[in-house]
Image (tube, rainbow, N blue to C red):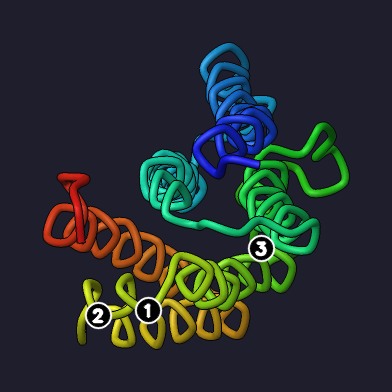
Amino acid sequence: MNPDLLYPHIRVVLSIILGMGITTLLSGLASVIEHPRRYGWSWIHMTWAAWAFLSIVTFWWWEFRLTQVTLWTFGKYVFVIAYCATYFMVSTLLFPKDVREYGSYEHYLIQRRGWFFGMIALITLMDLADTTLKGESRWHMLGHAYPVHTVLMLVIAGLGAWLASRRAQLIIALFALAYQVVYFTAEYLTLGVD
């Protein structure tokens, strides 16, 4: 089968899963706007929601490189679906359906931080495999910034899972969002040939 015809077929499933993640984030934001006392406004939580939104949008942008994969197997297909699903899980952990026992999204996030930051670590590790899937030229194009990015995101995930203080969580969230903006701006604003 022609690989040019196969990727658009695969892209549909990716788009559905990533679209569900964006929908979850936007619906959650709307619920906080509608009922701020019920869910509690939090800079920590909203910063991570902004980070997740930016991460999903940039991931979707970067996955265009999957057009360079010439041989698709069912294993690669399942891997890419699982990778997309981790972004959906991050969105769901940011905006669960019921936070009554926690009192607010912020308290839920801090209490369940092991799961949330575990997902960020998993995303980071899965990105290594995703980059490999796109070929050796992709590794060369990313250069030295990519291993630094990987280590930095794993450190962010580790610190976030370990530290429970609101101040530490806010600093980690703000740093992660600022870093994500800078990294994307420096590395990925234009799609082109490697």
The crowd level at tag 1 (other Cα within 10 Å; few <14, some 14-19, many 20+) is few
Comes first in the chain, label 3 or label 2: 3
- Residue bearing mark 3: 116
Instruction: Please name whichever residue, 147 or 33, is drawn nearer the observer in this view of the structure.
Output: 147
CB within 8 Å, label 1 to label 2:
yes
- Residue bearing mark 1: 136
- Mark 1 and mark 2: Cα distance apart in space: 7 Å
Q: Based on the displayed image, in which of its 4 quarters is residue 136 positioned?
A: bottom left
- The residue shown at (21%, 45%) is 191
- The residue shown at (60%, 85%) is 162
- Mark 3 and mark 1: Cα distance apart in space: 31 Å
Outermost residue to the front: 1
In this rendering, the answer to whether 133 lies above or below 15 is below
Q: Amino acid at mark 3?
A: Phe
| Residue 178 horizontal side relative to residue 152, left or right | left
In this rendering, the answer to whether 46 lies above or below 9 is below
| Residue 160 horizontal side relative to residue 59, left or right | right
Instruction: Say what secondary structure mark 2 lies in.
Output: helix
- Residue bearing mark 2: 140
Instruction: Say what secondary structure mark 3 lies in.
Output: helix
Check residue 94 in the rendering and tell me which mark sits there, or answer none. Answer: none
